Image (spheres, rainbow, N blue to C red):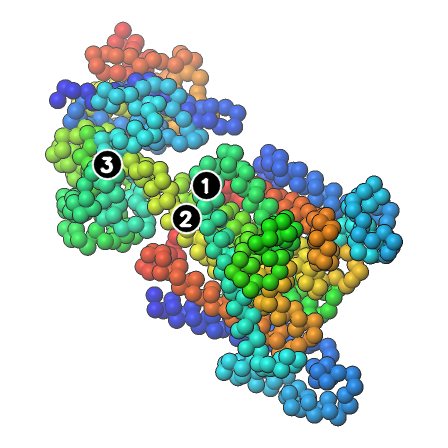
Amino acid sequence: MRKYLLKRIGLAIGIVFAISLITFIILNIIPGDPAALMLGDMASPETIAKLREQMGLDRPLPEQYIAWIFRLITGDLGNSYFQKKPVLELIGYALYYTSRLAICAYAIALIIGITSGVIAAVFQGKAVDRILMTIAIMGISAPAFWVAILLQIYIALNFDIFPVSGANEPIGFVLPSIALGSRYAASIARITRTSMIETMNQDFIKTARAKGLKNYRIILVHALRNALLPIVTVIGSDIGSLLAGAMLTESVFNIPGIGKLLIDAINKRDLPIVQGTVMYIATVCVLIYLIVDILYAVIDPRIKLGEGSSE
Amino acid sequence: MNKNEGYYVQSLKILKRNKLALVCIFIIFFLIIISIFAPVFTSYDPDKQNLSERLLSPGSEHIFGTDEFGRDIFTRCVYGCRISLSVGIISQMIATIIGYALGVSAGYFGKKTDGIISFFIQVFSSVPFLLFAMALMFVLGHGIINLYISLGVLSWAGTAKLIRAKVLQLKNQEYIFSSRLDGASDLHIILKHLLPNCIPTLIITITLGIPSAILSEASLSFLGLGVQSPTASWGSMIASSQTYIRTNTYYSLFPGICIIITVMAFHIIGDGLRDALDPKMRL
Amino acid sequence: MDEVILKVRDLTVVLDSLDKTFRILDKISFDLKKGETLGVVGESGCGKSMLASAIMGLTSKPLRIDGGSVVFKGEELIGLPEKKLRYYRGKKIAMIFQDPMTSLNPIIKCGSQIVETILAHEKVSKKEAKERSLRLIREVGLDNANEIYNKIPAQLSGGQRQRIVIAMALSCSPDLIICDEPTTALDVVIQKQILNLIKRLVQETRASCIFISHDMGVIADMSDKVMVMYAGQVVEHADQKAVFENPAHPYSKALQASLPQKAKGKERLHEIPGSVPLPDNMPKGCLFADRCPLADSRCKEQRPDLTNNNGHFCRCFKEQEQIG
């Protein structure tokens, strides 16, 4: 277990480094001079050159990368060109909204997804199953931002309690969470169903039936607990797209989260914010994958015994 | 090869039983025709502004109505289909070529090559896809070619992972081993022996990759990081419709429905193909 | 000793495929008395396990019970609603499955899996149920009961797991225990131990037992009566002694001839040519005709019935000719 942990943590660190390198390479082949951009059209070449020197832009790229990495490790993501504030502070403020939205959405998705997946599996082939799975496939096919707009049109505009935009009160999170969560509810429902059906065909379910256990107990205790294990891995791999989806949903509902921060920065070509946000989110994702992997090992007693790989 | 033929004949039989998938194949076929012969299906110019006919409701002239510049929404949906399908298909081609090449190399050559490629597979599957697509589009700028590239180079990891696993499983089979003993070159084995066996996996990954690429394109265009305006794209149409949700509901509705139908059709075909091509599903 | 506790009549199970239905079990009938052990023998694919599932009402789609009756202690089980069937399952009729590696839930503690069975059927406190489970674990020959109680199946060996399955089956003192090839998945040495354990426990609890196996030797060791099955049909059914000393059906003879100890010293091991016909490819005549050394044209054209010769049932024209 300890060896596994160390190996997994080492890998996570390696991945973060590789991501930082990719991010740096992508964002530094950018055409246009950030210094010139910051100072505007009226600036003289000398002032621009001076600023370039100040910002370290005149030094060779590898040197810039190393300097950036060192600043990253100390938690310094630089300052915004335009907002003149530390990027980390801006991200922290925005992340408050984004993480709240993401967590609410995913909680909704888990509850609805697992419930409907189990129901569909239990009634496999029946009308309920077909209806649920049709809804699910529509759910994974609809872009979250469009669902968000539909909710605005048909719910927010008709029922005053839901604001069309902004999220100053908790109620403001309801519609965005549904919009973002629907897609994950759909995919979780599909996975739960497959996993449940697979588990229900296993021998130990027949044992449970032969023992005369009640149906709900067979489904919830024996089947679902085993079927949930693969779902845990999916939860981890959803995080990246969940945050990205949150950005889109935020932009529909005008919530000042990471999405708005990043898109404004992209439009103004505010490089430190773009670089910092991408790096920050990527690191968060890798960290969550790591936690999920470790959690998985804890939940599944077979992995602790080193038997997990054979399953 | 005979054995392989039997395999595909049998898969086709299973697929034929799946009526829903057949309907969806028909839908996609129809959408491709529409995209190629777009001018035949509509008499309007998708980009030509006509300010006297702004924001009209659906009617006999404009069956989906018009947008804020008086452009016919139906026409723009038809031309948007071109963008979506081409981005979906071409970006997945790129992703498949990269994914197959790297997956095969990792699985076949093993050792250090495998170590490095596997690490990069891990890196690219941990990267939040849309976020990096945004960063790439930010750097490369608007445009459809840039969409092909960004979505292609960022989505190969899944394919590579599956191909690597498949090759590892195939590598030790006798006929591969014996053709190695006969002195067949690596390239020969990779193309003549491994590729045919990977085709089913590739078919499934491509059919399921296309809808996610289409959704990503829509998202990027929605954020203003996709095609250059005034080019019509379903995502950018939804973005501009936002201002008019109070007055012109239909405006947001149509492009979204286009996305749902297209993506859903691909998903259903993908599911059907997986059932038909995956031997595990067979009794 | 004479009370009949299980009466099976014309039990038929079919498999529904897309366009056809196939008969998997064809009109099985037998009686089982209290304390008696019925051995059911046949190659794999003969429908032995299906018989076990059908008795307990555990057939699930695409399989379906298509007629017949199973009367347990005077109550008809076929057509009984799930809720009532549940009372019998685990409480009155218990089952021991083939593969202990897969028949226990991999992520639940062994002890809890036994406790669960007790709590499902009896109004006892959790504490009592736990104590009883520990006693059962000791009874099936596992010494460190407290330790075993808290382990998950993956931490136990195959033999230990099968003992847990047995403890589970015994937990509510059933009247009938169905053992579905309980030793097939185990090592030879462990097999013997488990067989002895089952034999001892069945005798001690005076439960009736249906013992399913493909191994004639094991059947000879375990049963009072023997039922030989072939391709979903009963081909011979009689007392253990009668079947082993005076087998009537060519299939029973062939099965015995394939036993190592019987063949010892004589000739080399006898094998039965061919394999059990599949449901979609059943012969027109006697189902065994294609593999039978005695088969003639009549055997290939007509299906023989099960005939009774002083309590020795056999389904064979040749045998009937000899008697008649």
Q: Nearer the viewer, residue C218 or A310?
A: A310
Q: Residue at x 55, y 38 (%)?
A: A131
Q: Residue at x 69, y 67 (%)?
A: B137
Q: Residue A5: which quarter of the image? A: bottom left
Q: Amino acid at mark 3?
A: His
State if disc 1 and disc 3 touch (CB < 8 Å).
Answer: no
Q: Residue tagged by mark 3? A: C121
Q: Secondary structure at mark 2?
A: helix
Q: Quadrant of the N terminus of chain A?
A: bottom left
Q: Is residue A176 above or below residue C29?
A: below
Question: Between tags 3 and 2, which lies in front?
Answer: 3
In percent of width and height, residue C196 lies at: 16, 38
Q: Amino acid at mark 2?
A: Ala
- Closer to the N terminus: mark 1 or mark 2? 1
Q: Secondary structure at mark 3?
A: helix
Q: Secondary structure at mark 1?
A: helix
Tell me how far mark 3 sits from mark 2, CA to CA: 26 Å
Q: Amino acid at mark 1?
A: Ile
Q: Is residue B70 above or below residue C226?
A: below
Q: Residue tagged by mark 1? A: A119
Q: Nearer the viewer, residue A174 or A263?
A: A174
Q: Residue tagged by mark 2? A: A227
In the image, taking residue A172 as reference, residue B26 lies left or right, namely right
Disc 2 chain ID: A
Q: Nearer the viewer, residue C25 or A31?
A: A31
